[in-house]
Image (cartoon, rainbow, N blue to C red):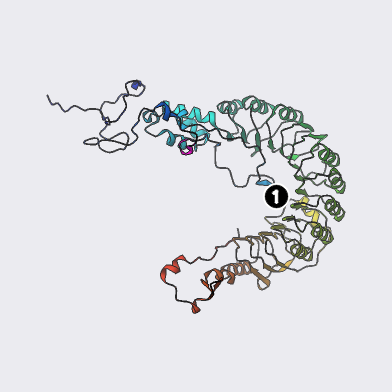
Amino acid sequence: MNNRQHQPHVSPSATDYSSFDFNLRPSKRRGSYNCGRCGQPKKGHSCHVGTPSTPSPAAATPAPSDSSAAISAPTSLSSSRPPRHQHYSRFRRALSFDNIDLTCESPEPDFAIEELLDPDPELSGGLPAAALWEVLRRLPPPGLLAAAQVCKGWRETSRRLWRAAEELRLRVPPRAQVGFVGSVLQKCSALVRLSLTMESDVDATMLACIAFSCPNLESMEIYTSGSAVNRITGDELGRFVADKRCLASLKMEGCSNLGGFVLCSSSLSTLWLSDLYSLSKMIFNCPNMREISLEFSRQENDSTDLTTMADGLGRNCPRLQNIHIASIRLSHSVVLALTAAGLRGLRMLSLVLGSEITDASVAAIASTYSKLELLDLSGSSISDSGIGMICNVFPNTLSRLLLALCPNITSSGIQFATAQLPLLELMDCGMSICDPTSEDSNSDETCDFELQKAFNNKLHLMYQKLIIKHCCLKKLSLWGCSGLDALCLNCPELNDLNLNSCRNLRPETLLLHCPRLESVHASGCQELLVDTIHSQVKNNPSALEDQYPFKRSADGSKRIRVPHSFSQPPDDDMKRRRVGRRECYVVVD
């Protein structure tokens, strides 16, 4: 009888696996001819890949000083990659605190991977424990649930991964029940940050489920998508905030059914509520509140008393730094209530769509808050005189000024602002310099009909000219300025320019001296103007400055640029190392 019987492939240094139960796997009728670890043929092969070894007690947990041997728990499980810009309301389009996270960051646990996973690669599908952990932590929740059905090792790894997760972003489908969300949340015992995109209706039952499953929740975001309706009332929201002692950030969309609320919390620092409508009461008792954003529905019959709300907000939230309120009921009395509060730490103030906000309101703001870094009065009725007051008070602090949809300002006021505010980095003057004879109202950037009333009160002089020279300006928005026919920009740091719907801007009167431009938006402009923009951003003479080589002067004191005609001809290596022009994209769609 032939003695060539198939022997199991065992590495010389392999550990004895007799203690494991191999009956968990289905038996094979024939053995594999390839190595299960490296895939090479078994004949004459000694495998050294992924060879398990019995860890000693001293090596099971790495020393605290060895940071490379320890892998922290994941901080995020997401159903999809989050968009760079969430679907917040477009009126918060340029506020810097959209991208600032003020939530309390909990420290990541510091433990070794050996404490989480079985070091045996046979139980993890042949993968090292660290590699399996890194692969599974990048899967979305549906993929992680599917991975748990592969084998016992993957199921254990998935279970421990759920327990270690600190952040979860979940999209709830239209037909999903509350039990679906509850079953997922119960897996995450260490969850501190939760973001739900609801495609189905949300009510108090969902809040109760979140409160029960996430006792240590610090940040919660609820967004509505499609036809989903937020049915949470003000009393239910108030009880939820009062019960969550660790909650520091709350962001919620579709709050049209609140009716009125009382929020009392010593931990809440960030609050965003949108789609508010006809609130009977708005009481905030949050002494540690740093940022608040309230957006109201643009309906004429909204009966919310914003003056009383602003007065209580100033008295009960003394640490406020960022305020954003968007409502057509904003008025001068609301501004006076905010200024009477004397918020010493206020740095960003955004009062949007208040057509009754005038130069007197600007004077009240300037006399009380002299350290503002961002001021957004879009949709107001301020004039060039108000811009003058802003420039006189905030020359050393203001870096972002937004005056879109302001019908009473002219190109002279915009030029004065750019000349008197040396730290200005962002300016938005969209729909301010308008052509009153234009009948085309189908602009992509034009807001709803209610907003057009703000700039139909006063007719401007047609064909205004704008000349801006600024060394720090990075973003400039002139969208919808159909009354602008000449533009000259000398801004070396400008990287984003919005000229959408500047229909009367002529190609022969356009001059862009902006070597760092990265994107120019020219949707709705003349074709000749778009061609002129293309030619100017590609043939900018300032881009050629970097191509001259440096040469040290004779005394060795400094390095100066010299043309190639006065220096040695560059070789091929120098040409390859030469920095090319900065590419600029012209967006016309």
Q: Which residue ends up furthest to the left in the rendered image?
A: 1
* Quadrant (top left, top right, bottom left, bottom right) of the N terminus: top left
Q: Which is more toward the observer, 371 or 291?
A: 371
Q: Position of residue 279 (x, y in %)?
A: 81, 36
Residue indicated by mark 1? 95
Report the number of discs. Answer: 1
- Which amino acid does the dot numbered 1 rest on? Leu
- Quadrant in the rendering for residue 408: bottom right
Residue farthest to the front, as pictured: 555
In the image, is residue 310 above or below residue 363?
above
Residue 394 located left or right of residue 71: right
- Say if the magenta span includes residue 66: yes
The answer to whether one can see residue 448 in this image is: yes
Callout 1 secondary element: loop
- Provide residue 104's location: percent of width, then percent of height: 65, 37
| Of 443 and 368, the residue lying toward us | 368
Residue at position x 80%, y 61% from top? 409
Where is residue 364 drawn, in percent x and y? 86, 51
**For the stretch drawn in magenta, what is the main secondary structure?**
loop
- Report x, y in % for residue 260: 79, 33
Q: Which residues are magenta?
A: 62-70
The quadrant holding residue 275 is top right
Q: Is residue 95 above or below residue 407?
A: above
- In reply to whether residue 446 is colored magenta, the answer given is no
Left or right: 150 as drawn, with respect to 431? left
Is residue 587 visible in the rendered image? The answer is no
Q: Nearer the viewer, residue 235 or 162?
A: 162
Mark 1, Cα crowd under 10 Å, few <14 / some 14-19 / many 20+, is many
Viewer-nearest residue: 228 or 21: 21
In the image, residue 471 above or below residue 208: below
Quarter of the image for the C terminus: give it.
Answer: bottom right
